[in-house]
Image (spheres, rainbow, N blue to C red):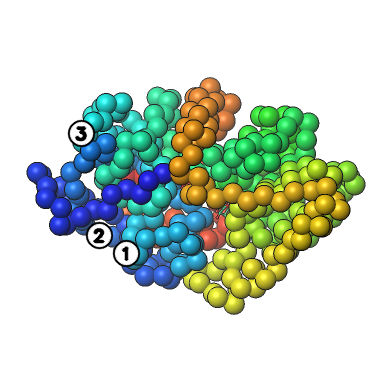
């Protein structure tokens, strides 16, 4: 996942192409996003010009906009880890892709744009049967869920998985992957409609209210044997509950601190409170209970081509076969106002599945 080459006004260009992008200009509420017309450089060696048709929106985009995300370029920059589009032009030494190819790309930032210059090694083909919005809804959430469940926790058939935020982007992907692999899934979600979706549509055995005290309900459902794999993107007391619920040889995979972002603008006290409430784990406590705690960060796996490419190819093949479904809650226009509305929508915890910006 290399970053897209920055749109540059200073590079010499054979042709000057103007395009539009949505940028984070300052840290703040969704209205801190701005639309800009920018110049696009020509694709260089090993690069393509991608005409973007759809861009996935992720929770981390909100964190970036609020100034609560670690690995970001200087302001202003465009967020967006994943796009689907059409190869418009090729630079030198690009042989695997051609003009007109429909592809998805994983990038570190920059996806809220109509055009991108991007290394060809970041591109993946996707099946004809998927729309660009469906294709753009897959990479981050399915890769994160796949890596959490199988590369990190080594989840296996017959085990029980607890998936927090089960109706969200990563959550809906994780529930599907776990059910497909023969795990018994218990989730949490914030509304009755979301919980019904997670059980009836995705096949979870049970789903409990994420806004309430779900720990006794989970325990009542799985019994004292406990949970084999817990996926925790929430932090704070949710992490403590997951640890208490782990069975012997249970694995907790931690991959987010959603609790640090209860509002639409950065609040250092709330972020600090979530951080402080997240348990500090002494290795001896793991020894005593025969449990493990693991963490993942997709961005920091960007050089693991040998892990990401086969996983992506397998996920898209299963999506084409109807075994996995990209769940799209809503699409918004790939414009500044569309991105503002999309961010508001995610902050509201209303989405079941992904939010996607479409051109
Ligand atoms: N480490 C990585 O590589 C990686 C990669 C992708 C995502 N993530 C993390 O995974 C999480 C989910 O990402 P996503 O893109 O799937 O987001 P999403 O679609 O917005 O889903 C997040 C879910 O978390 C719950 N939530 C939202 N705000 C919350 C809060 N303040 N406190 C507690 N729960 C909250 C909501 O569920 P309910 O209201 O239904 O409970 C929401 O549906 C985020 O924390 C994100 O940063 C990490």
Q: Secondary structure at mark 2?
A: strand
CB of mark 2 within 8 Å of CB of mark 1?
A: yes
Give the quarter of the figure containing the C terminus. Answer: top left
CB of mark 3 within 8 Å of CB of mark 1?
A: no
Q: Spatial distance from mark 2 to mark 1, Cα to Cα? A: 10 Å
Give the quarter of the figure containing the N terminus. Answer: top left
Residue 9 appears left or right of 228:
left
Q: Which residue carries the number 1 mark? A: 76
* Mark 2 or 1: the one toward you: 1
Disc 2 residue: CB within 8 Å of ligand 1:
no
Q: Using a 10 Å C-alpha cutoff, classify the residue at mark 1 as few (fewer than 14 neighbours), some (14 to 19) or many (20 or more).
A: some
Q: Residue furthest left?
A: 14
> If the picture is divided into quarters, which one holds ligand 1?
bottom right
* Viewer-side residue, 61 vs 7: 7
Residue 138 appears left or right of 246:
left
Q: Which residue carries the number 3 mark? A: 92
Where is residue 83 drawn, in percent x and y? 38, 42
């Amino acid at each position: 996942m290399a970053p897209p080459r920055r749109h540059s006004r200073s590079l010499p260009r054979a042709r000057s192409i103007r395009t539009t992008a949505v940028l984070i200009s300052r840290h703040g509420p969704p209205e801190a996003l701005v639309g800009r017309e920018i110049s696009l450089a020509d694709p260089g060696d090993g690069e393509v010009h991608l005409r973007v048709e759809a861009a996935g929106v992720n929770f981390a985009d909100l964190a970036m906009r609020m100034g609560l995300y670690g690995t970001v370029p200087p302001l202003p920059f465009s967020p967006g880890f994943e796009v689907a589009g059409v190869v418009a032009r090729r630079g030198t030494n690009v042989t695997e892709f051609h003009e007109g190819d429909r592809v998805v790309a994983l990038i570190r930032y920059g996806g809220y744009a109509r055009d991108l210059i991007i290394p060809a090694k970041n591109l993946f083909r996707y099946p004809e049967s998927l729309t660009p919005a469906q294709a753009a809804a897959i990479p981050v959430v399915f890769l994160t869920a796949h890596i959490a469940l199988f590369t990190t926790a080594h989840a296996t058939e017959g085990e029980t998985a607890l998936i927090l935020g089960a109706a969200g982007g990563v959550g809906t992907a994780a529930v599907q992957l776990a059910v497909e692999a023969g795990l018994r899934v218990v989730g949490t979600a914030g509304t009755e409609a979301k919980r019904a979706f997670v059980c009836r549509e995705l096949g979870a055995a049970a789903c409990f209210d994420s806004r309430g005290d779900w720990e006794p309900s989970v325990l009542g459902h799985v019994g004292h044997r406990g949970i084999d794999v817990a996926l925790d993107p929430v932090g704070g007391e949710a992490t403590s509950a997951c640890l208490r619920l782990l069975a012997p040889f249970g694995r907790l995979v931690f991959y987010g601190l959603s609790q640090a972002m209860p509002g639409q603008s950065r609040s250092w006290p709330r972020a600090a409170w979530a951080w402080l409430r997240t348990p500090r784990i002494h290795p001896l406590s793991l020894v005593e209970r025969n449990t493990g705690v693991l963490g993942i960060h997709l961005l920091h796996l960007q050089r693991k081509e040998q892990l990401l490419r086969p996983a992506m190819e397998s996920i898209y093949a299963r999506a084409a076969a109807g075994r996995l479904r990209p769940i799209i809650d809503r699409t918004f226009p790939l414009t500044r106002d569309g991105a503002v509305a999309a961010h508001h929508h995610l902050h509201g915890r209303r989405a079941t599945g992904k939010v996607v910006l479409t051109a």
